[in-house]
Amino acid sequence: MGGVIGFLALLGAIWVIYDLWTNNTKLTQTEKLVWTICAIFFNLITAIIYYFTQKK
């Protein structure tokens, strides 16, 4: 079960980082960097928060 959650966390982090740097033009470079660092350290939680706050 831990492997599945780890895989989902990795996919969430990759999705956030990809979407930030390719699709999200309204954020500054500094905000993107902060989101990227959060995605690396808090994978799944960051993906959920990013989805509800930035993907309106």
Image: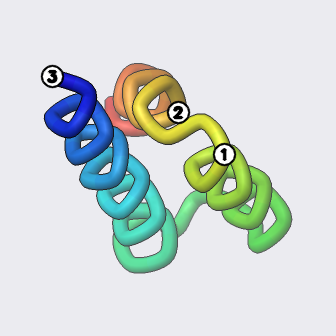
The answer to which quarter of the image holds residue 34 is: bottom right
Lower sequence index among marks 3 and 2: 3
Residue found 76% across the figure and 73% down from its top: 29
The amino acid sitting under disc 1 is: Phe
Q: Observer-nearest residue: 17 or 24?
A: 17
In which quadrant of the rendered image does the C terminus lie?
top left
Lower sequence index among marks 2 and 1: 1
Q: Observer-nearest residue: 13 or 24?
A: 13
| Left or right relative to 54: residue 5 | left
**Is label 3 in a helix, a strand or a loop?**
loop
**Is label 1 in a helix, a strand or a loop?**
helix
Query: Compared to 52, does 15 lie above or below?
Result: below
CA separation in Å, label 1 and label 3: 20 Å
Which disc is residue 32 wearing? none
Circle nearer the viewer, 3 or 2: 3
The answer to which quarter of the image holds residue 51 is: top left
Residue found 15% across the figure and 34% down from its top: 4
The amino acid sitting under disc 2 is: Thr
The amino acid sitting under disc 3 is: Met
Residue occupied by mark 2: 46
Residue occupied by mark 3: 1
Which disc is residue 41 wearing? 1
